[in-house]
Image: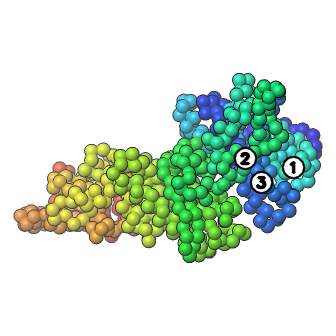
């Protein structure tokens, strides 16, 4: 059907549009970055599909992005000759939000404009950011491979609905035309648009073209020529040498690949040569995404093969416990027609994954071990956001277990607060004369851990105990039995062996007491026969009269509660 159809936005889109227009106004220039980023993605997708179907290039193989404006009509247009959209795709992609973490995002909105602006940024602003500067957006698009008559015009004023109609569009790809709001005429200038592009989109690997401007002596003003020029560097950023890339360019590239609004926490950029050749540019974000705990979530790595984009979210390139890492890996060894199935079995991929894992751990170590306060603070931020995920690595990545263990941070009786900032090395450095074990207690939360009766004897002797309160801790500890040759011991399990921390006099005293109370203990054992496995005289308590203790080889109370909660 060729006639125009009016359709409603998904309710969430309406809400997002309202929020965006109001809370991102002070950041309005980012609309251009978002639209150019989409044009670049669309070109990547075309190049990828064309690997198996060269006809998609339709005699127009030079992929590029054009930014033009019309002063009289007060419009700015961003055009690409990428993959384009079919009618159904336009309705789906420009009318709904199909992102994981959407529910979580909407549930966290507070109504406080500043806080919500940060949340929207984190969620990803995307196409709808055009409405910050435009009161109407027209999208003319045709999917590569479809007939010229199968073009689509999508149009909306960014309120409740949008229209779609069929149009003729001879050129493949998408033209996005912004009808500027009152007061946005500043954008109708070569100089202004160029400076925004250079600031936010210089890293885009395709040429971004604008019409040349020239001084006209007769008219006494600059006039636009019909000739285009490239206004960005137009080479894939990761292929450039480190010394040619500014921190700002690294940051903007991160925003492009991650769809994040904030700058990253840290990055690592390397060219690996030898048996396996690849380039990696990997970033650690500042903040956990909304879907960090989503089991269906895929990784954040874009795979390129010899500069050609192959796929987003190539989860095989990063272990699951580093799923928060974003970036690009460009391999020189993999075939262009590589599929997810092939990736699964490829030896090259295994080599890349191992190499990338080492790089990321190295990057984290640099932050963690730095003497520079700023770097240390970065590690603290990292730990707060992603520490629980990193802990999964202790169980998942046997080869790097030791390295990961050294990156772990815990709350401890050494500090009087719940901050997780004590490493095993810190702990070992403070061990008492004669102490050869690392002591810890697990509990549901900090208050419960800190007030555990099991800690009494340790307090008395001035021995530090690590307080473990994250859900993953018990699971993690089942893979971690010692660190630097020091056994990890729960203070709540079995016969607490304080080893040399107990002096001879104390041992004698204990033996004497045990004999004294033998009869009483036997009576209690009989009385509690079906409730307790054993009853013992204890020396681990100094204030409390009694406590429950798990057998050395049994699940602890906390883990039992956790498994029950998980329905096991
Ligand atoms: P994101 O880029 O994070 O997917 P956006 O809101 O920026 O989200 O874009 C939504 C979707 O619209 C894209 O995923 C894509 O499918 C489609 N889209 C947007 N711009 C273009 C374009 N220039 N060419 C083809 N598809 C596009
Ligand atoms: Mg986008």
- Front-most of 96 and 166? 166
Label 2 sits on a secondary structure element that is: strand
Label 1 sits on a secondary structure element that is: loop
Disc marking residue 536: none
Give the side of residue 445 with respect to residue 242, left or right: left
For the point 77% across and 54% down, which residue is it? 63
Residue 512 appears anywhere in the view: no
Give the side of residue 54 with respect to residue 555, left or right: right
The quadrant holding residue 62 is: bottom right
Q: Are marks 3 and 1 in contact (CB under 8 Å)?
A: no
Q: Residues within 10 Å of mark 3 (few under 14, many from 20)?
A: some
Q: Residue 174, position in %: x, y?
A: 80, 46
Label 3 vs 2, first from the N-terminus: 3
- Front-most of 344 and 301? 301
Label 3 sits on a secondary structure element that is: loop
Give the mark toward the camera: 3 or 1: 3
For the point 87% across and 39% down, which residue is it? 5
For the point 63% across and 30% down, which residue is it? 25
Residue to which mark 1 is pinned: 171
Q: Residues within 10 Å of mark 2 (few under 14, many from 20)?
A: some
The quadrant holding residue 349 is: bottom right
Indicate whether 462 appears above or below 218: below
How far is the residue under mark 2 from the one under mark 1?
A: 20 Å
Indicate whether 513 appears above or below 276: above
Disc marking residue 63: 3
Residue to which mark 2 is pinned: 230
Q: Residue 465, position in %: x, y?
A: 26, 56
Q: Are marks 2 and 1 in contact (CB under 8 Å)?
A: no
How far is the residue under mark 3 from the one under mark 2?
A: 13 Å
């Amino acid at each position: 059907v060729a006639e125009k159809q009016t359709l409603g936005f998904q309710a969430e889109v309406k809400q997002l549009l309202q929020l965006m227009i109001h809370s991102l106004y002070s950041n309005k220039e980012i609309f251009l970055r978002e639209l150019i980023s989409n044009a670049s993605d669309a070109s990547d997708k075309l190049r990828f599909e064309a690997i198996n179907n060269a006809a998609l290039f339709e005699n127009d193989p030079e992929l590029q992005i054009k930014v033009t404006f019309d002063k009289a009509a007060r419009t700015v247009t961003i055009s690409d000759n990428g993959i384009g959209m079919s009618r159904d795709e336009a309705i789906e992609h420009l009318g709904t939000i199909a992102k994981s973490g959407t529910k979580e995002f909407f549930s966290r909105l507070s109504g406080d404009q500043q806080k919500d602006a940060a949340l929207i940024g984190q969620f990803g602003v995307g196409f709808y950011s055009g409405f910050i500067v435009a009161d109407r957006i027209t999208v003319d698009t045709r999917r590569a491979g479809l007939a010229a008559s199968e073009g689509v015009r999508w149009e909306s004023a960014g309120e409740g609905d949008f229209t779609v109609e069929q149009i003729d569009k001879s050129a493949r790809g998408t033209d996005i035309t912004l009808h500027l709001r009152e007061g946005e005429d500043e954008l109708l200038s070569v100089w202004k648009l160029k400076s925004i592009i250079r600031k936010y989109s210089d890293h885009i690997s395709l040429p971004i073209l604008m019409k040349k401007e020239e001084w006209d002596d007769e008219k006494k003003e600059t006039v636009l020529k019909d000739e285009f020029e490239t206004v960005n560097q137009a080479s894939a950023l990761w292929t450039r040498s480190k010394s040619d890339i500014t921190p700002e360019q690294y940051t903007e590239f991160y925003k492009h690949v991650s769809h994040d609004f904030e700058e990253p926490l840290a990055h690592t950029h390397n060219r690996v040569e030898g048996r396996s050749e690849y380039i990696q540019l990997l970033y650690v974000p500042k903040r956990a995404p909304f879907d960090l705990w989503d089991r269906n979530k895929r990784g954040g790595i874009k795979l390129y093969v010899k500069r050609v984009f192959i796929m987003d979210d190539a989860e095989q390139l990063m272990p699951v416990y580093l799923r928060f890492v974003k970036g690009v890996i460009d391999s020189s060894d993999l075939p262009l027609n590589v599929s997810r199935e092939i990736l699964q079995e490829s030896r090259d991929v295994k080599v890349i994954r191992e190499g990338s894992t080492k790089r990321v751990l190295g990057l984290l170590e640099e932050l963690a071990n730095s003497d520079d306060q700023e770097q240390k603070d970065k590690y603290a931020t990292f730990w707060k956001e992603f520490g629980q995920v990193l802990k999964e690595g202790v169980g998942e990545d046997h080869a790097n277990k030791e390295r990961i263990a050294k990156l772990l941070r815990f709350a401890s009786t050494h500090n009087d607060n719940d901050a997780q900032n004590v490493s095993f090395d810190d702990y070992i450095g403070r061990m008492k004369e004669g102490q050869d074990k690392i002591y810890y207690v697990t509990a549901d939360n900090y208050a419960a851990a800190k007030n555990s009766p099991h800690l009494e004897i340790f307090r008395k002797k001035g021995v530090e105990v690590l307080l473990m309160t994250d859900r993953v801790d018990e699971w993690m500890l089942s893979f971690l039995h010692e660190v630097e040759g020091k056994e990890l011991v729960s203070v709540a399990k079995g016969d607490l062996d304080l080893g040399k921390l107990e002096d001879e006099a104390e041992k004698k005293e204990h033996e004497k007491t045990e004999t004294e109370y033998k009869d009483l203990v036997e009576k209690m054992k009989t009385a509690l026969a079906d409730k307790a496995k054993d009853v013992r005289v204890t020396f681990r308590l100094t204030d409390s009269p009694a406590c429950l203790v798990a057998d050395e080889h049994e699940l602890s109370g906390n883990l039992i509660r956790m498994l029950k909660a998980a329905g096991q």
